[in-house]
Amino acid sequence: MNTKTINFQVEKTAESKINAVDWDNLPFGKVFSDHMLEMDYADGKWQDPVIRPFQDLKMHPATSVIHYGQSIFEGLKAYRKEDGSVSIFRPEMNGKRFAESCKRMCMPELSPELFVELVAKLVEIDEAWVPKKEGYSLYIRPFLFAMDDYIGIKPSDTYKFMIFTCPVGAYYAQPLNVKIEENYTRAAEGGVGRAKTAGNYAASLYPAMLGQKEGFHQLVWTDAKEHKYIEESGTMNIMFVIDDVLITPSEESDTILRGITKRSVVEVAQQWGMKVEERKVTVEEIITACKEGRVQEAFGAGTAATIAPIKMIGFRDEKFELPAVETREFSNKVHQYLDDLKIGKIADENNWVFNV
Ligand SMILES: *Cc1c(COP(=O)(O)O)cnc(C)c1O
């Protein structure tokens, strides 16, 4: 790993907290590794990154991000390979997406190469925190936010980029009940749906809560204008297998987050010779296919779960049960394939695995 170009300042913790971790009981996102990375943007340029012990931030009450939400993030994972080394899955894709989110939110860009280098350096320092247990991983959270102490509305002049990591357990996603949402929207054309920016998640909480009260784990978002087209499921991309074809909403509209898991599933399916359609997907065709029993599989795709099977789709007053998860050939196979790839169990023919 060539880190010669970056001048890292590393301040190590005096005492690691790793022995206090209950590895058999890891709640998602509540256990933090020993170190974090900080890199400030000021005077029109990025300052040198600093890695220091994980600690609280001190902020001015007028800090711009708190008021106006100029804030973006990423989520990726490091895995313990079978040979004991550590891998990260396609981090340059997260770097590219981060740069795109920066642009849309009027924030200073960070090159994807630098992004990957910073992620890799922090993971290297807290290497011991990458769990050795099967199915476990180290969740990596890079983020960037506006730091000006100013309550006028304008792009901030100063920013803070940070990364912290969390060891996380196996994500045994219970099969999801989802509801096709026709009133609220996640993203509108011309908006910020394609950016991984804080406000998108804040805006989704209320409709998601209403859905949960009705017994749905997640909402399937539809387009803002007509609620005729399927977009995403919760904070995952959505995919279907209908008549042996893998179908997923295309990313042409700027309302859909360009997921790396989804992209990988599409690429693997194509390599396996499966027919794939990335196009507008109507609510109507999904409901018709449900009624005719042609939906073989439906699932969410995202870094947290990789594949989260959908077992029931609710639409207006109807509920459609989908085939049993064990019978789903494609999603089980692709899930296993991606898991095996990340831990070095099978050959990395696409060069997707970054070795730390
Ligand atoms: C992060 C995210 C995804 C999944 O992206 P991955 O790169 O696969 O983790 C999908 N939709 C939304 C809204 C997201 O925030």
Image (cartoon, rainbow, N blue to C red):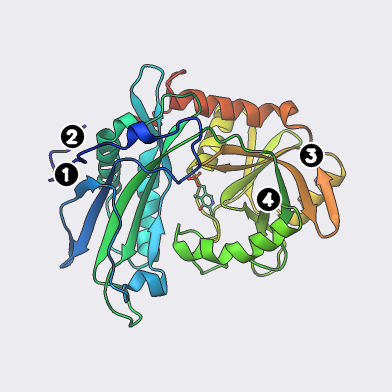
Q: Which mark is residue 110?
A: none
Instruction: Tell me the residue that label 4 is attached to.
Output: 217
Residue identifier under label 1: 11
158 on left or right of 289: left
Compare marks 4 and 3 and give the one earlier in the sequence.
4
Q: Looking at the image, do the residues carrying marks 3 and 2 touch, with CB atoms under 8 Å apart?
A: no
For badge 3, the amino acid type reads Leu
Q: Residue at x 32, y 76 (%)?
A: 62
Mark 3 or mark 2: name the one nearer the start of the chain: 2
Q: Quarter of the image containing the N terminus?
A: top left
Name the residue tied to disc 2. 2
Mark 1 or mark 4, which has the lower sequence index?
1
Residue at disc 4, secondary structure? loop
Q: Nearer the viewer, mark 3 or mark 1?
A: 1
Give the crowd class for mark 2: few <14, some 14-19, many >=20 residues within 10 Å.
Answer: few
Mark 3 surroundings within 10 Å by alpha-carbon count, few (fewer than 14), some (14 through 19), many (20 or more): some
| Disc 3 target residue | 322
| Lower position in the chain sequence, tag 3 or tag 1 | 1
- Looking at the rendered structure, the kind of residue marked 1 is Glu
